[in-house]
Amino acid sequence: MDKLKQIEKLRDKALAELKRVDSLEAAAAWRSAYLGRKGALTQLLRGLGRVPATERPRLGQLGNELKVDLEEAYAEILPNLKQAALRRSLEMERVDVTLPGRPLGPGRLHLSTQILREIYAIFAQMGFQVEETPEVELDEYNFTLLNIPPYHPARDMWSSFYTTDNRVLLRTHTSPGQIRVMRRYAPEPIRVMLPGKCYRYEQVTARSEIQFHQVEGLAVGRQISMADLKGVLIEFARQMFGEETRVRFRASHFPFTEPSAEMDIECFLCGGQGCRVCKHTGWLEILGSGMVHPQVLTNGGYDPQIFSGFAFGMGPERIAMLKYRIDDIRYFFISDLRFLEQF
Ligand code: FA5
């Protein structure tokens, strides 16, 4: 076949095939088949070297025209193919915004917070309201104003975390809040709960942490007696641990209360028979308490001739341990969800 015919045939074939091209991939294959380095048209143009010199310029021109025509035809279909490809990919990757989202696990209250709130609710019924007092405290409030002067042996009861300024420490109990609140409200009668974190520099064990909560209770008024203290605390124990709960008050000593008592509840595990948990006594201590010492009332701005008061301090983690039979206080602060999610 002469070259002229070959060129015309190639044009017909290429254009006919291009009409059937329906994707970017097929277009690329078409381009490489006709216009690529090894493509049909390129081969044909190369073969022109062998035709007689007189025909060569004309055939070369026709060949080049065909090349330009094919390039143009190709460029013409390309935008449509690109559009179609985009439409297809959008269709395939479509996001269904009407699908429900993945549920986020709701957070929950930490067990210490839950038990604190239970304690607030019980005392709130008896007229106690929550007040906040500082966690970083002056040595003067933590000890001195509570009748624990620098040389007093009772300071040994609390091993403390001091700051570099040894007048400032992390409070070892919530009792310094008593002075702060009395000074805030004296000479009005008060009934408050003072919750918060406390810190003691001591051995960590199944029952003792270096960081724990306390809730202080304080009532100051004109006619307050030890009977009020007992009534309030017995009511608390019954609401917290159940109507049948038996409690006992045991004489004790705190420098800032006189007289002082610790309250025990009957051991939940052995029912008072005596076991390992209650160290074979049948009782578990839950708080310290007493009548506010006259000197402490004076330090707080109340005249002890007119006013009296009671105070108590309890550990919510220890209470939660009893209520939920948790055998190690360290679970509270290691942030293990397997533990926390049980409450
Ligand atoms: C006090 O801290 C006194 N301030 C309580 C008080 C207040 C007495 C008002 C009189 C009037 P005590 O050191 O016993 O007392 O601590 C009170 C409670 O805090 C304990 O019964 C216990 O429940 C909790 N607690 C004490 N130390 C720790 C500890 N290391 N880890 C966890 N809980 C603790």
Image: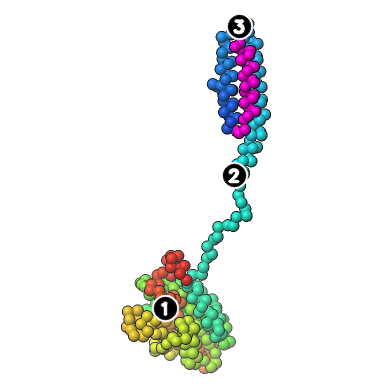
Q: Residue 53, labelled with which disc?
A: 3
| Amino acid type of the residue tagged 3 in the rendering | Ala
Q: Horizontal and vertical percent for residue 301?
A: 54, 86
- Numbered badge on residue 92: 2
Residue 116 place in picture, x, y as percent = 50, 76
Taking depth in this image into account, of 301 and 48 the one nearest to the observer is 48
Q: Quadrant of the N terminus?
A: top right
Q: Which one is closest to the eye, mark 1 or mark 2?
A: 2
Gap in Å between the C-alphas at discs 3 and 2? 57 Å
Q: Nearer the viewer, mark 3 or mark 2?
A: 2
- Of callouts 3 and 2, the N-terminal one: 3
Query: Which residue is tagged 1?
Result: 322
Q: Nearer the viewer, mark 1 or mark 3?
A: 3
Which mark is drawn over residue 70? none
Residue type at mark 2 is: Met
SS for dot 1? helix
Q: Residues within 10 Å of mark 1 (few under 14, many from 20)?
A: some
User: Which range is magenta?
Assistant: 1-24
Q: Which one is nearer the viewer's eye here, 250 or 31?
A: 31
- Please tell me in which quarter of the rendered image ligand 1 is found: bottom left
- Residue 96 image position (x, y, % from top left): 61, 51
Q: Residue at x 62, y 9 (%)?
A: 56
Cα gap from disc 1 to disc 3, whole angstroms:
110 Å
Q: Is residue 19 left or right of residue 313?
A: right
Which quarter of the picture shows residue 318? bottom left
